[in-house]
Amino acid sequence: MKTPARSPMKTLAPLVARIESSTPAHRDRAIDGLRALALLAVPTGHWLLGGFTLDADGAIHNASPLSAFGFFAPVSWVLQMLGVFFLVGGHASVLSYRRRPGTTAQWLRGRAARLGRPVLGVTAVWAALIAVLSAAGVPEDTLRTGATLVVQPLWFVGVYVVVTALTPLCVRAARRLGGWAAAPLLLSVAVVDLLRYGPYADAVPSWLSALNILPGWLFAYQLGVCWGEKRIGRRGGALLLAGGAVLFAVLLVVFHYPASMVGVPGESRTNSHPPSLLVLALAAAQSGAAVLLRERLRRLLARPAVWAPVVVVNLSAMTILCWHQTAMLAAAVPASYAGAVPGLTTAPDSLGWVLARSAWLPLFAAVLVLIARYARAFESPWTGATRARRAVAGVLAAGFLAFALGVA
């Protein structure tokens, strides 16, 4: 007599129960839920808004559906959630900073190591992959496209390390100024935007825009620190939501900022690299919404079945960030040998492509889960790695970055 097949829910029930029982009572589930939401928005955005074209030699090149469909821009407003990520990062850093067992320098080294190990891992592995795939005959243009995509989200790690190092200063600013500690950062970005987009823009050097990088991303992080210091409550959240939404609308309608939150090929202006005032307006509105929805999220995530996937996503945070582009490339590169495959190697310039790409998303997600089973090892301390092995990994990573940036 055959044993009845167990349902997926019954199979996962022990894991859900184990996660629930191991969660400390003081854990702020809303913060973890917001982090998971922001994390999942990164691969979803890259998978939906990043496409490929195939040239006569069979190589793939980056393309974007936003070039053909300007009305897709609002999708980027939803999927651009780095403001939320920096917000919850600032909040979590405050709690971690308070509980640090050693010195501030030791705390910073620990935080940097946690972020750096997965980056070193993915770049070292890709250095080896480049050599193998090149020997197998994969076109160099395809390899450079892949390398560019892999490096694309890693800039975030460097910026995040820098803003994390500023946590002690952010804490002092929050205690002195409350939520208004983020206002000078907003003003700084506004001044730079006025200079580079205003009436005297032609006389402004191009490097000036780089001055927005640090204050642009520190803004939401500072809000998170203020939130963690209990200097922003529901009234502050409502002010952020309303003020951010109004500023966002004014910048779009009156000052004609680009509608897309990500770069669009062929456009002379971009909101994201470096962040423009529009990015900060969106981050303010998202931060306000996060503050206001906190209690509802806590109640929702009190359910073990809802909480368990949030924990899994958070435990794989850096793996998701570092490897999601590889998951997409794992489907696109083999498809390039089959010619024009809808949603993979065809130009993203039709609604048919949008439907086809949407159908590929489950495959990308499945490949990412498979990769994560092995790549998550890079997130753990490399206790068994000798100094020589770490040096080799560093050399491989440097070589890959040189290739991706066009130096090699």
Image: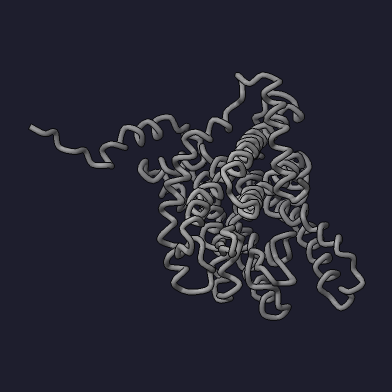
Q: Taking the image as drawn, is residue 232 in sight?
A: no
Q: Please provide percent x and percent y for residue 374.
A: 49, 33
Image vertical order of residue 388 relative to residue 271, above or below? above
Q: Which colour scheme is used?
A: one colour
- Seen at 56% across and 43% down, the residue is 136
Give the quarter of the image for residue 228.
Answer: top right
Tell me which residue sits at (64%, 65%) in the image.
261
Would you identify the image quadrant in which residue 52 lies?
A: bottom right
Front residue (pair 80, 324): 324
Residue 371, horizontal then vertical, whole percent: 49, 39
> In the orientation shown, which residue stands out farthest toward the right?
203
Within the image, what quadrant is residue 74 found in? bottom right
Quadrant assignment for the N terminus = top left
Q: Locate residue 327 relative to residue 359 in the image: left or right.
A: right
Q: In this view, does 65 lie to the left or right of 352?
A: right
Depth check, front residue: 19 or 65: 65
